[in-house]
Amino acid sequence: MKPVASLFVSGRLRMAFTASVMPKLHIHDLRHTFASWLLQSGVADKTTQDLMGHKTDSMTRRYSHNSLKSLKKAIDQMEADTL
């Protein structure tokens, strides 16, 4: 499979976002979403790092964000384990 040029993809996405109701969305936002969804789905940190193309785990942590649902699930799990 031939790699797609980054500028081509960015340009196409920008056109799609401009035509939609979400013109403030950027391709970079999709990287944050991708990393967050992988980790929230239980994908291993190292696998997420590899899929993101990051050399360090600190960069992967910078891109990933917890949802309120995943934070609540962690608290519920802790309570179940300790009570």
Image (spheres, rainbow, N blue to C red):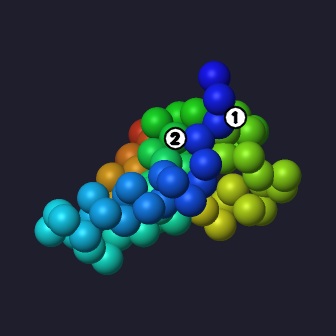
| Residue at the spot 58% in from the left edge and 33% down from the top edge | 43
Q: Which residue in the rendered view is the most extreme toward the left?
A: 21
Of residue 3 and residue 46, the one placed in the foreground of this image is 3
In this rendering, would 70 be left or right of 3? left
Q: Amino acid at mark 2?
A: Leu
Query: Which circle marks residue 14 in the picture?
Result: none
In this rendering, would 34 be left or right of 45? left
Report x, y in % for residue 32: 51, 60
Instruction: Relative to 36, say whether 51 is above or below.
Output: above
| Residue at the spot 65% in from the left edge and 66% down from the top edge | 62
Quarter of the rendering containing residue 68? bottom left
Report x, y in % for residue 75: 43, 53
Q: Quadrant of the C terminus?
A: top left
- For label 1, count other residues whose C-alpha is less than 10 Å away and answer few (under 14), some (14-19) or many (20+): few
Q: Quadrant of the N terminus?
A: top right
Query: Circle 2 sits on which residue?
Result: 38
- For label 2, count other residues whose C-alpha is less than 10 Å away and answer few (under 14), some (14-19) or many (20+): some
Instruction: Relative to 70, say whether 38 is above or below.
Output: above
Distance CA(mark 1)–CA(mark 2): 9 Å
Q: Which residue in the rendered view is the most extreme toward the bottom?
A: 24
Q: Amino acid at mark 1?
A: Thr
User: N-terminal of the two: label 1 or label 2?
Assistant: 2
| Residue at the spot 46% in from the left edge and 36% down from the top edge | 41
In this rendering, would 60 be left or right of 15? right
| Residue at the spot 38% in from the left edge and 57% down from the top edge | 13
Give the secondary structure at mark 1: helix
Report x, y in % for residue 82: 51, 44
Give the secondary structure at mark 2: helix
Query: Circle 1 sits on which residue?
Result: 47
In this rendering, would 4 be left or right of 71? right
Question: Is the residue under label 2 in contact with that under label 1 (CB below 8 Å)?
Answer: yes
Instruction: Relative to 41, say whether 34 is above or below.
Output: below
